[in-house]
Amino acid sequence: MILSSVPVARRLVRATTGAAAVAIVLAGCGGSPSDSATSATAGTTSQTSSAPASPTSRTPSASPSTSPSTSPAAAVPIAATPPAEPVELADACTAEGAYRLAPGGAVDPALPARDGATLTLALTGTSGAHGDPAAQLTASLHGDVPRPVEPLAVGDSVGIGDWTLSITSVCPDAVEFDLLD
């Protein structure tokens, strides 16, 4: 009986430690009560990643709301999730992916609607902060104000509403990705 309670005790300690870590992170985020009210009215929800921390890891983001918004929260970039293992490619322009997006164009083929909502993406650039290949997108859910997405490299994924995109190719003139369900 004592042996079977050890795993339960460990799980309890892990759960308590995890809850404490979340509380510390939330407390460390700072801001005033009005900041959280702004975030709540924008209809944002947190997403978490189990990806290990790395110099290129990104912080969790907020999902865009499904109603039009002009609040400052609309300009908060949607966070990308780096791959669990770094992607080593000689060239980020693999020309592989089920969907393609070029600057000034629409996603080809069109993204499917989900639960009556639509996702509109725009490619604004293909170069990261250090000149590395990275897709710079904006996303708009069901006609919302477009929000920027953190720069996306090959292997990165991003959740936007009911859609999760996985970047498969970043070329100078287009980005290609797969849609994960």
Image: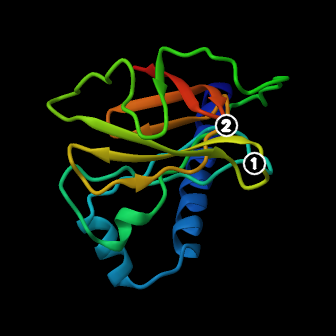
Image coords of residue 50 (percent x, y): 62, 38
Left or right: where 21 falls relative to 65: right
Q: Residue at x 14, y 31 (%)?
A: 116
Q: Mark 2 or 1, which is nearer the eye?
A: 2
- Toward the viewer: 156 or 168? 168
Local crowd size for mark 2, using a 10 Å CA cut-off: few (<14), some (14–19), many (≥20): many
Could you tell me which secondary element the residue under label 2 belongs to?
A: loop
Residue carrying label 2: 153
CB under 8 Å between discs 2 and 1: yes
Q: How many marks?
A: 2
Examine the image and state in which quarter residue 117 appears.
top left
Find disc 1 in the rendering and name its residue: 56
Residue at the location (72% across, 55% down)? 129
Name above or below for residue 160 compared with residue 60.
above
Which quadrant does the C terminus fall into? Answer: top left
Disc 2 marks a residue whose amino acid type is Ala
Mark 2 or mark 1: name the one nearer the start of the chain: 1
